[in-house]
């Protein structure tokens, strides 16, 4: 190296180092900002996906709300004709909310023996519509008898048996089996009506049963089935009002029927496959649609990347990059500090609230416990004073009165012992020291023994207790704890039953035993159904009904310790039914 060049490098070494460091910092900052740009694009894409999913779900919910409203019209009346149906639909002003409604209608259920009568009634003019088609022997039939809007296009479908189309049949049977709304897979709407090609979409079905006072659980029975309300929805109509960032411009949406992305299941595509390039971002989202599952595929094109990034690299490379990075780190530190403070404040508020609630529960419990313990103590003290005076009297002793007072004292002592036992049980449960002595126990025998113990109390209250049990139901349980569960439930039934009958039922299957205790007393509101199983909780005022509010809490803890579960079904003024389900194999089995 020439001497002049060597001297130049030594003199300008610091400058060259600054340049080198500056270039390294600039390169690192450029890479960092480029990564940040990518993450912002990805977040923007995620936001668009979330808005797209939400928008589609809202459109689905809007259609389902319309559908359930029409279902309510049919279930609320034993007979709905086309005029009433049309008037109801007109009152909804659907032309504004659903301007391109494909049509909504009612398909009547026809058993094989009813097809001829239906066709004859149609031909005689007694029933509006068209004869059932297509003809052919089948196990069951349906016929479209009402549609809205009823025009030249939709009138072609009157009389059509939708059970003849596999996808519609599957959805109708699923709706019949569950008693709930069910959707078909991908179908061609207006399929089979003359030469109409139809549009891609799906159909919603929900069964309509004859109104009955007897509540029946959903199932595949067609005893009271009148037919199905159905709503065909074209995918292009469903997505016509869909709006989210970049939709159809830089982000494409594909909707597939099912959990797999395949051409045969494609319900909707916002662009033609030939016009799409390789996506830069892609995300699949699965959503439930009336017992079906859809897969939504969102794809971002290269145009999505170009938006909002012009000039950013030049700004980053400029002299303000270092200051920007410093401010970024400072701001991030401040945000973290503020977030930490907010979390600490929220936790402090939570702990303060829990402490306040605990103090309130303690005060309430002490007040109730003092009242409950004072009552038998006061009565016991009074009886002992009277007994002492009678023994100290100079006259002859009245043995009958002595016996009554001793018996009264014994009752109050028993009541005190019961209250103390309840407190001890709560203490054991809180410390996890509840021990179980498992043995083979016959639940049927245990129920009858418990009912016999309550015969005197039930007779005094004028209550008739009946037991419905098919026979021995043997399981591995703790006899004493199971007796305690029965005692608490029967005691509550007599206490809140207001003299009405109490029914005790025992059932079993291969794995579980079920115990039901039903009274017909005051009942309780639905919002109290879970709260009453809490510690010191009660659904009625302690002024009218005594007790510490521990009976059902202890009962639930004992049932869960035995591996089971307890629930209550009740209507105010109509009584309550407590149901206990226990595994026959004892704790540790799957309930």
Image (spheres, grey):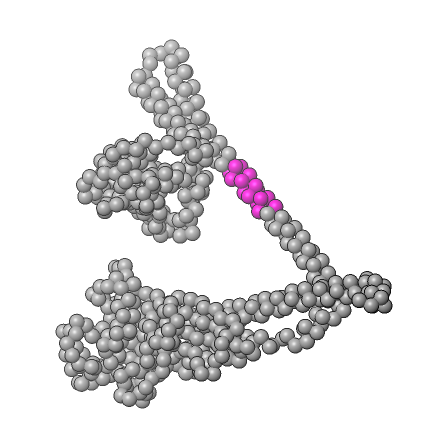
**Most common secondary structure along the magenta stretch:** helix
* In the image, residue 412 lies in the stretch drawn in magenta: no
Q: Quadrant of the N terminus?
A: bottom right
Which range of residues does the magenta coloring cover?
A: 348-364
Q: Is residue 244 visible?
A: no
55 vs 390, nearest the viewer? 55
> What residue appears at the point 56 percent right and 78 percent down from the top-left corner?
303
Foreground of the two, 7 or 141: 7
From the viewer's perspective, is 548 left or right of 467? right
Q: Residue sitting at 69 percent across and 56 percent down?
A: 334
Q: Residue furthest top?
A: 394
* Membership of 360 in magenta stretch: yes
Residue sitting at 59 percent across and 47 percent down? 347
Q: Quadrant of residue 386?
A: top left
40 sits left or right of 319 in the view: left
Seen in the picture, residue 379 relative to 189 is either above or below; the reply is: above
């Amino acid at each position: 190296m020439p001497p002049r060049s060597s001297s130049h490098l030594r003199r300008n070494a610091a400058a060259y180092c600054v340049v080198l460091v500056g270039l390294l910092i600039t390169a690192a900052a450029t890479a960092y900002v480029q990564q940040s740009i990518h993450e912002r694009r990805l977040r923007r894409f995620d936001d668009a996906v979330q808005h797209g999913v939400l928008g589609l779900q809202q459109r689905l919910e809007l259609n389902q709300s319309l559908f359930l409203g029409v279902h309510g019209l049919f279930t609320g009346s034993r007979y709905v004709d086309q005029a009433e149906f049309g008037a109801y639909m007109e009152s909804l002003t659907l032309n504004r909310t659903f301007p391109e409604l494909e049509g909504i209608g009612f398909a009547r259920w026809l058993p094989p023996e009813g097809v001829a009568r239906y066709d004859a009634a149609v031909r005689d003019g007694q029933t509006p519509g068209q004869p059932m088609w297509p003809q052919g022997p089948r196990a069951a039939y349906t016929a479209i008898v009402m549609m809205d809007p009823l025009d030249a296009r939709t009138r072609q479908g009157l009389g059509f048996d939708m059970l003849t189309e596999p996808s519609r049949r599957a959805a109708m049977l699923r709706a019949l089996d569950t008693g709930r709304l069910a959707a078909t897979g991908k179908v061609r709407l207006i399929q089979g009506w003359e030469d109409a090609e139809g549009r891609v979409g799906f159909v919603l079905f929900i069964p309509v049963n004859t109104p009955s006072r007897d509540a029946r659980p959903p199932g595949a029975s067609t005893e009271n089935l009148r037919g199905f309300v159905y709503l065909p929805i074209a995918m292009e109509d469903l997505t016509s009002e869909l709006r989210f960032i970049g939709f159809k411009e830089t982000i494409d949406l594909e909707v597939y029927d099912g959990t797999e992305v395949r051409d045969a299941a494609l319900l909707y595509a916002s662009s033609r496959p030939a016009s799409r390039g390789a996506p830069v971002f892609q995300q699949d989202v699965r959503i439930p649609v009336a017992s079906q599952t859809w897969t939504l595929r969102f794809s971002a094109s290269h145009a999505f990347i170009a938006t909002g990034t012009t000039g950013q690299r030049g700004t980053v490379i400029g002299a303000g990059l270092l200051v920007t990075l410093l401010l970024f780190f400072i701001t991030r530190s401040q945000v973290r500090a503020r977030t930490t403070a907010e979390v600490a404040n929220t936790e402090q508020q939570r702990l303060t609230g829990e402490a306040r609630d605990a103090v309130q529960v303690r005060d309430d419990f002490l007040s109730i416990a003092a009242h409950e313990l004072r009552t038998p103590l006061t009565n016991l003290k009074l009886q002992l004073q009277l007994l002492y005076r009678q023994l100290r009297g100079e006259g002859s002793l009245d043995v009958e009165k002595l016996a009554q007072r001793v018996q009264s004292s014994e009752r109050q002592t028993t009541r005190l012992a019961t209250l103390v036992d309840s407190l001890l049980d709560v203490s054991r449960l809180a410390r996890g020291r509840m021990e179980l002595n498992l043995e083979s126990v016959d639940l049927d025998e245990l129920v009858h023994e418990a009912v016999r113990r309550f015969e005197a109390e039930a007779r005094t209250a004028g209550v008739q207790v009946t037991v419905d049990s098919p026979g021995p139901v043997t399981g591995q349980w703790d006899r004493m704890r199971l007796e305690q569960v029965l005692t608490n439930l029967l005691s509550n039934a007599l206490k809140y039953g207001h003299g009405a009958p109490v029914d005790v039922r025992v059932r079993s299957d291969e794995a579980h035993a079920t115990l039901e205790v039903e009274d017909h007393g005051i009942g309780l509101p639905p919002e109290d159904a879970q709260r009453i199983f809490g510690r010191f909780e009660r659904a009625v005022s302690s002024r009218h009904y005594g007790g510490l509010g521990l009976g059902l809490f202890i009962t639930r803890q004992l049932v869960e310790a035995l591996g089971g579960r307890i629930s209550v079904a009740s209507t105010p003024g109509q009584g309550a039914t407590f149901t206990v389900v226990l595994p026959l194999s004892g704790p540790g089995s799957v309930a």
